[in-house]
Each structure stands twice: as C-alpha cells, then as structure tokens.
Amino acid sequence: MAEKLIFPDGRPKEPWSPETERRAVAGLIGLTDEYLDNLASNPEERPETVLPPGEPGISIETTPSPTVASDATSWH
C-alpha cells in the first residue's frame, strides 16, 4: 500500500537515483507522521496489543507509566 501511495505510477526500476531515494524516504516519513498523528488524535481507536488478546507476544501499553515524566523535555 505504501508503495502505491509513494509511487502511484509504479515502483521505479533499480538502482534508484538519489532523487528517487529522497522521494521514497520523504513518502515513508509522511505516512509515518500521518499514522502517528491519527493515533494521537484518536486514542479510543489505539490498539492495546500487537496480537489479539490471549496470543503470546509483546503488548503495548496505552496508558502512561507513572515513572515517565509528563513533560518530554524534562529529564530527571
């Protein structure tokens, strides 16, 4: 899906030119930013785990840890 969004006319043949590499990186960063903005603006839609409940794997906490400073610029 990302490939179609970044290269709507199809993936360029390799080796890529420096400009094509920059376009690909900029597109991936843009998609990542959009995804993270969406998660931040819709906390009720944020997944609680990577895998379905009951499946072994790594879970992701959706609530802040009390040991993490609320101000990300502060280091204690």
Image (tube, grey):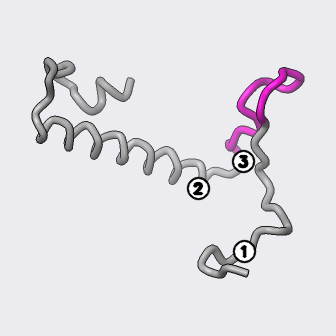
Give the CA separation, mark 1 to mark 2.
Answer: 18 Å
Query: 44 or 66, which lies in front?
Result: 66
Give the vertical position of 72 relative to 30 (above or below): below
The residue shown at (44%, 50%) is: 33
Task: For the residues labelled 1 and 2, say whether their Cβ atoms are less than 8 Å apart.
Answer: no
- On the rendered structure, is 40 left or right of 15? right
Give the CA separation, mark 3 to mark 1.
Answer: 20 Å
Give the CA separation, mark 2 to mark 3.
Answer: 9 Å
Query: 53 or 22, which lies in front?
Result: 22
Where in the figure is residue 45, as x and y percent of width and height? 68, 42
The residues colored magenta run: 44-58
**Residue 9 placement: quadrant:** top left
Q: Label 1, on which residue? A: 70
Rendered image: mark on residue 44: 3
Give the vertical position of 66 relative to 7 (above or below): below
Rendered image: mark on residue 41: 2
Name the N-terminal-most of marks 3 and 1: 3
The residue shown at (63%, 73%) is: 72
Tell me which amino acid carries mark 3: Glu
Where in the figure is residue 22, as x and y percent of width and height? 20, 43
Tell me which amino acid carries mark 1: Ser
- On the rendered structure, is 9 left or right of 74? left
Rendered image: mark on residue 42: none
Mark 2 Cα shell of 10 Å, populated few (<14), some (14-19), many (≥20): few
Name the N-terminal-most of marks 1 and 2: 2
Circle 1 — which element?
loop
Nearer the observer, disc 3 or disc 1? Answer: 1
Circle 3 — which element?
helix
The residue shown at (35%, 47%) is: 30
| Count of residue discs | 3
